[in-house]
Image: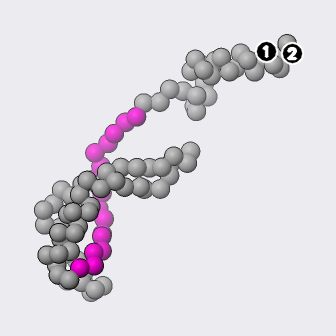
Amino acid sequence: MSTLATHETEQAALCEAGNCGHTDCQPQTEYAFDVKLFATIRVKATSEAEARTLLRKHVDAADTNFGAWPNGDPIIGEASLDDNHPELIEINGEAV
């Protein structure tokens, strides 16, 4: 076996064992954070009451996607409404 092949085999064994020092080969732990975010969500409905019902029905406990991490994995989460009476700030683009 050539020296290069031996080195590659040894390096592969170190990577497999998590002892190589490469950050992408290190075992990872998943951490979950309870993060408070502010969002404006526009809802089309025939009344404010219907819009609030739709918001609660479709946004509370909804899966979310916030783009991608530097490695390309999706940034995913769950959205929950913590306010039973979200603040109405606009109607048809006009501040209220």
Position in image of residue 73 (x %, y %): 51, 46
Decide if residue 41 is on the left or right side of residue 28.
Answer: left
Q: Is residue 65 magenta?
A: no
What residue is at 30 percent from the left and 70 percent from the top? 41
Q: Is residue 31 magenta?
A: yes
- Distance from disc 1 to disc 2, alpha carbons, whole Å, reads 6 Å
Please, is residue 54 above or below residue 35 in the view? below
Q: Is residue 40 above or below residue 62?
A: below
Residue 33 to residue 61: above or below: above
Percent across and percent down for residue 91 are 24, 84
- The scheme the figure's colours follow is one colour
Give the structural element (helix, strand or loop) at label 1.
helix
Relative horizontal placement of residue 70, taking residue 90 as reference (left or right) = right
Identify the residue at horizontal 55%, vertical 48% (top origin). 72
Q: Secondary structure at mark 2?
A: loop
Please state the horizontal and vertical placement of residue 37, each as a whole percent of the image.
Answer: 30, 57
Number of residues whose C-alpha sits closer than 10 Å to that of mark 1, classed few (under 14), some (14–19) or many (20 or more): few
Q: Is residue 17 visible?
A: yes
The residue wearing badge 1 is 6
Q: Which residues are magenta?
A: 30-45
State the mark number for residue 25. Answer: none
Among the 4 quarters of the image, the one containing residue 16: top right
Compared across the picture, whether 59 is left or right of 86 comes to right
The structure residue drawn at horizontal position 41% and vertical position 55%, both measured from the top left corner, is 65
Report whether 58 appears left or right of 10: left
- The residue tagged 2 is 2
| Circles 1 and 2: CB atoms closer than 8 Å | yes
Q: Amino acid at mark 1?
A: Thr
